[in-house]
Image (cartoon, rainbow, N blue to C red):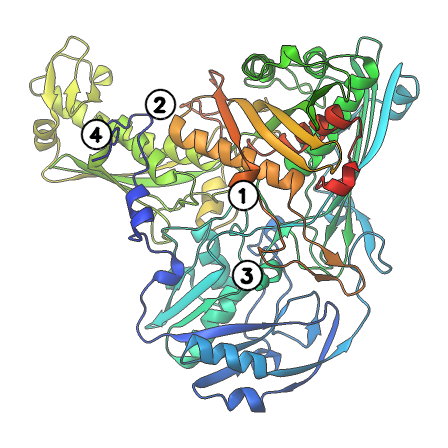
């Protein structure tokens, strides 16, 4: 057993319980699942972004040996129903339904599925399938004729309100210090290591789908709706996931199509979509344009904040990023105006990507804050201190806890910020211009209704069952820690089962809610077991003690006076065999129908910034050193440091990995990642990981993560704030601010490249 693996209480740092399985290949991902005699599917995706399929010639494709069938809109029409858009109470990340008619609505839409005995045969036939299009001129997005601009408020049917307070424009006009600027963030695509795959199998009318998913209950219920099935007849299994962070949060249309293919062939079907197909059959981060105006008094106190954003989306779906929910609440300011607009274009529907609202919008706000600090002649940390607040300004609600300035102070000390010469272009080492920048990071504390079953067996082992997901963040481990803590067991005695829609439902693994939501309900189940053991023990050797004071610790039921009964004996007294408890929890402040919604597979997270009594978020401060070569403008980030406060840290080891991964993701977002779009054809150009750049080891020399202790009393009984999406939010601005400090050049468009600073 590796070091630390037996000591796994909350707050300790056991190694991942699934680590060995993952590095030895014992962990089975969706496409690894063995199914009998599978047929292989290969997707054919559209070569145009807008128009109609005029003709399909299948002859050459059907002549390929081993081809079993070719599904097109002609053979599939009407077979897959509407699952509804997730944000409108449905399940799907996109309501564009391929193969249901002859329309093409975006580049890379699925236009045919070839089914064959072998993968290579399916691929060859796919290349031989001839499709003729009647092409129409597409709108790619910003600057394209035919793109349609609507306000997010209008697009949401009035359910979305742009946050605001006071009269920001008048206050800005009269402000002593003013900055106003435009910012832009690019389309970015998920490139998880595990490709988008689906395996579908029917047995006696029951459908089993193996697919990497952040929400097996959502996928199950959505598939049932699309296929007209009783949800009880659908099972989704997703025990391991090779990267997610939003890309596997909502149902995509491929799943039902593969299920139909398997039903038609009467045998299991496997699909492994290619890397480039992943750019168009799943979701991605929407491109934005933003305008920020900040007005301050001579002391640097904000008097006006205006934040307007426009985001590209598909024709039918009102997916919104709307990071103004966060940027309008983070600093004290009496006058705030925000507005979010959507630009409908001939694109696939964007969706969640790690810190969806905060990443682009905090880039703009935190860049503007740095511009304001410069204009006011203030240190950027001091500017944030002067605008720090324990109440958000829109409704005046208190933050349940907020350690932004302690994070800045801890981070600044560790980074050596005091040695920074504030003047741009003032720090240099040889040919390299050196710049130091910082920015605030924030991620709202979301919570969801959750359920779990915990079984304690007479041999002193526990089994935890909950349909949460291991998206690579360490969920198996932290859930095991919750049970180990609750039952006083070593971690090695706890088995966690997740990623299966036949298990009690747990929320979507999104919005960084799962550690808080699921550990809370697991602890509640353990408490019921403890209470039952305690009640029985007070009839025996622990007679006379108040059962409420008995604790399960180190394999025994223990009274405060030191008396104890070994767990095996307590079990024997309380039960004939095992004790099995099912628990369900609705976090405080969430609507009473949250559990019902959870069972229906609907995404219903609460908390965060939309509470009625208070708002809650995790905070951090990020510090970056950049070096820009004075002749070539080569850009490097030799060191990056983040100080974070996120309430109780369940496992500092996995938490550190998440935050480190976030900082590295932030480097990629600031300097590398962008999906290039041919504006004439509305097609993605660099849809592969040779040309869609992400950071490699050479781009990430030194990453440091610090935890700032914080006690959170309100969010949940354990005091947990999610942190999976906290790390990458501030990094873009911290790097842009460091680039300004190094070069004197303000870059307001991501990614920052050599040509941005030449
Ligand atoms: Mo995360 S982008 O909420 O999966």
Q: Earlier in the sequence, mark 2 or mark 1?
A: 2
Residue located at (12% from left, 35% from top): 575
Q: Residue at x 22, y 25 (%)?
A: 488
Q: Nearer the viewer, mark 4 or mark 3?
A: 3
Secondary structure at numbered mark 4: loop
Tell me the element at label 1. loop
- Reply above or below: 456 against 299: below
Question: Which residue is denoted by mark 2 in the rendering?
Answer: 11
The disc label shown at residue 275, or none: 3
Label 2: element kind: loop
The local crowd at label 4, few if under 14, some if 14 to 19, many if 20 or more residues have their Cα within 10 Å, is many
Frontmost of labels 1 and 4 is 1
- Residue that lies at the very extreme toward the front in this rendered image: 430
Give the alpha-carbon distance from disc 2 to disc 4, as whole Å.
14 Å
Frontmost residue, 504 versus 370: 370
Q: Residues within 10 Å of mark 2 (few under 14, many from 20)?
A: some
* For discs 3 and 1, the disc positioned in front in the rendered view: 1
Task: Kindly indicate the quadrant of the structure image that contains residue 544.
Answer: top left
Q: Which residue is mark 1?
A: 696
Residue 255 point in image, percent of width and height: 49, 64
Reply above or below: 136 against 672. below
Contact check, label 2 and label 4, Cβ < 8 Å: no
Is the CB atom of the residue marked by disc 4 within 8 angstroms of ligand 1's nearest atom?
A: no
Residue underneath mark 4: 490
Compute the Cα span from label 1 to label 4: 38 Å
The answer to which of marks 3 and 2 sits earlier in the sequence is: 2
* Residue 567 appears left or right of 228: left
Dot 2 or dot 4: first in sequence order is 2
The local secondary structure at tag 3 comes to: helix
Contact flag, marks 2 and 1 (Cβ < 8 Å): no
- Of residues 65 and 202, the one nearer the viewer is 65
């Amino acid at each position: 057993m590796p070091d630390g693996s037996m000591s796994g209480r909350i707050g300790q740092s056991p190694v991942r319980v699934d680590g060995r399985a993952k590095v030895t290949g014992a962990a089975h991902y969706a496409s690894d699942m063995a199914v009998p005699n599978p047929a292989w599917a290969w997707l054919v995706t559209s070569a145009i972004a807008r128009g109609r399929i005029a003709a399909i010639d299948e002859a050459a494709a059907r002549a390929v040996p081993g081809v079993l069938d070719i599904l097109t809109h002609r053979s599939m029409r009407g077979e897959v129903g509407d699952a509804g858009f997730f944000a409108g109470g449905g399940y799907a990340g996109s309501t564009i339904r391929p193969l249901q008619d002859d329309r093409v609505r975006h580049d890379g839409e699925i236009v045919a599925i070839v089914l064959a005995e072998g993968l290579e045969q399916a691929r060859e036939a796919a290349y031989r399938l001839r499709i003729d299009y009647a092409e129409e001129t597409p709108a790619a997005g910003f600057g394209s004729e035919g793109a349609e601009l609507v306000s997010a408020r209008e697009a949401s049917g009035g359910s979305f309100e742009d946050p605001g307070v006071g009269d920001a424009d008048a206050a800005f006009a009269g402000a002593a210090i003013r900055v106003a600027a435009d910012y832009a963030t690019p389309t970015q695509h998920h490139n998880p290591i595990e490709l988008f795959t689906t395996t579908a199998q029917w047995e006696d009318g029951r459908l089993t789908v193996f697919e990497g998913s952040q929400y097996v209950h959502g996928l199950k219920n959505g598939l049932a709706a699309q296929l007209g099935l009783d949800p009880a007849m659908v099972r989704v299994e997703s025990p391991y996931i090779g990267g997610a962070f939003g890309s596997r949060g909502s149902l995509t249309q491929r799943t039902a199509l593969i299920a139909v293919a398997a039903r038609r062939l009467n045998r299991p079907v496997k699909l492994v979509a290619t890397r480039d197909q992943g750019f168009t059959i799943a979701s991605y981060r929407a491109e934005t344009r933003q305008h920020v105006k900040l007005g301050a008094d001579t002391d640097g106190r904000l008097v006006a904040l205006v934040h307007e954003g426009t985001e590209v989306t598909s024709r039918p779906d009102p997916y919104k990023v709307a990071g103004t929910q966060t940027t309008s609440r983070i600093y004290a300011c009496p006058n705030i105006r925000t507005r979010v607009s959507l630009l409908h274009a001939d694109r696939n529907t964007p969706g969640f990507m790690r810190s969806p609202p905060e990443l682009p919008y905090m880039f703009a706000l935190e860049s503007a804050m740095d511009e304001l600090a410069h204009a006011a002649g203030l240190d950027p940390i001091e500017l944030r201190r002067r605008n720090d607040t324990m109440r958000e300004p829109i409704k005046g609600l208190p933050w349940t806890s907020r350690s932004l300035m302690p994070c800045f102070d801890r981070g600044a000390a560790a980074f050596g910020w005091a040695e920074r010469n504030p003047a741009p272009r003032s720090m240099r080492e040889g040919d390299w211009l050196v710049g130091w920048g910082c920015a605030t990071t924030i991620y709202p504390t979301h919570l969801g209704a959750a359920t779990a079953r915990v079984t304690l067996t007479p041999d002193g082992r526990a089994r935890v069952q909950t349909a949460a997901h291991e998206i690579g963040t360490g969920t198996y481990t932290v859930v095991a820690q919750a049970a180990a803590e609750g039952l006083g067991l070593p971690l090695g005695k706890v088995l966690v089962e997740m990623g299966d829609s036949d298990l009690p439902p747990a929320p979507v693994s999104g919005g960084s809610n799962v550690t808080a939501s699921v550990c809370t309900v697991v602890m509640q189940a353990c408490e019921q077991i403890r209470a039952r053991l305690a009640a029985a023990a007070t009839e025996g050797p622990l007679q006379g003690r108040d059962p409420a004071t008995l604790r399960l610790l180190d394999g025994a039921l223990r009274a405060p006076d030191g008396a104890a009964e070994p767990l095996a004996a307590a079990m024997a007294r309380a039960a004939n065999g095992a004790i099995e408890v099912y628990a369900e929890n609705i976090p405080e402040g969430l609507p009473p129908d949250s559990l019902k919604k959870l069972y229906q597979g609907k995404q219903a997270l609460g908390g965060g910034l939309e509470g009625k009594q208070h708002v809650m978020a995790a905070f951090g401060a990020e510090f970056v050193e950049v070096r820009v070569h004075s002749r070539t403008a080569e850009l490097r980030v030799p060191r990056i440091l983040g100080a974070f406060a996120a309430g109780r840290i369940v496992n500092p080891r996995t938490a550190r990995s998440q935050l480190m991964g976030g900082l590295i993701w932030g480097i990629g977002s600031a300097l590398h990642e962008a999906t290039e779009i041919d504006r004439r054809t509305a097609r993605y150009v660099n849809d592969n990981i040779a040309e869609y750049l992400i950071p490699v080891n050479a781009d990430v020399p030194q990453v440091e993560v610090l935890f700032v202790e914080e006690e959170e009393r309100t969010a949940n009984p354990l005091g947990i704030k999610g942190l999976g999406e906290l790390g990458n939010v501030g990094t873009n601005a911290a790097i842009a601010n460091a680039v300004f400090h190094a070069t004197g050049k303000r870059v307001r468009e991501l990614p920052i490249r050599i040509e941005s600073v030449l």
